[in-house]
Amino acid sequence: MATDGIEAVFMETRNWGKGAKFLQALGFELEVTAGDGSGVFRNGDGAYLVLVEVPEDREPAVQVALKVADADRFEVDPVVEVVTPFKETHYGTREMTVRDPDGRLWSLQAPAGS
């Protein structure tokens, strides 16, 4: 079983307000925020973008999450290094982390209970 494209992009920012305005200027709409320096944006039917504020002394990172229909049926090809197997998250999904040949981490995201 393969992945089903990009589910989300997780982006860190040093300034939530400026980052949010930048995304909105590019056509993204804020769908959800808890007012804590994080929020979920979407542009049409595309992948969602999660923006999270981090401290000034931290280099902002970006992580791509690939969509998986069913975590229990997903088979990892031997060329893929699994860092953490699928586990439940606090936000209602199951996630696995893998590392690509250049050392970047990728998230694979499936619906909870799948």
Image (tube, rainbow, N blue to C red):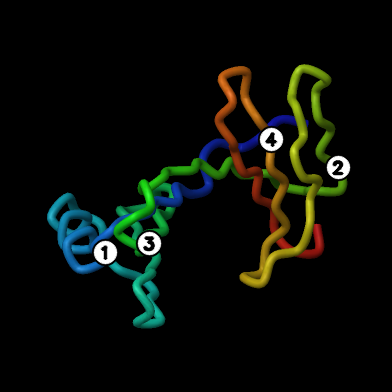
Q: Dot 2: few (<14), some (14–19), or many (≥20) neighbours within 10 Å? A: few
1 and 4 marks in contact (CB < 8 Å): no
- Which residue is tagged 2? 73
Q: Secondary structure at mark 2?
A: loop
Q: Residue at x 81, y 45 (%)?
A: 85
Tag nearer the camera, 2 or 3: 3
Mark-to-mark CA distance, 2 and 3: 35 Å
Disc 4 or 3, which lies upstream in sequence? Answer: 3
Tag nearer the camera, 1 or 3: 3
Disc 1 or 4, which lies upstream in sequence? Answer: 1
Tag nearer the camera, 1 or 4: 4
- Which residue is tagged 4? 98
Task: Give percent across and percent down for residue 14.
Answer: 28, 58
Tag nearer the camera, 2 or 4: 4
Mark-to-mark CA distance, 1 and 2: 33 Å
Mark-to-mark CA distance, 1 and 3: 21 Å
- Which residue is tagged 3? 54
Disc 1 or 3, which lies upstream in sequence? Answer: 1
Q: Secondary structure at mark 3?
A: loop
Question: Taking 66 as reference, is 39 above or below it?
Answer: below
Q: Dot 4: few (<14), some (14–19), or many (≥20) neighbours within 10 Å? A: some
Task: Give percent across and percent down for residue 93.
Answer: 68, 62
Give left or right: position of 101 versus 84.
Answer: left
Q: Which mark is residue 29?
A: 1
Mark-to-mark CA distance, 2 and 4: 17 Å
Q: Choose top left, top right, bottom left or bottom right for residue 104.
A: top right
Q: Residue at x 56, y 19 (%)?
A: 102
Tag 4: amino acid = Val
Q: Residue at x 70, y 52 (%)?
A: 95
In this orientation, which residue lies closer to the viewer: 82 or 47?
82
Disc 1 or 2, which lies upstream in sequence? Answer: 1
Q: Which mark is residue 43?
A: none
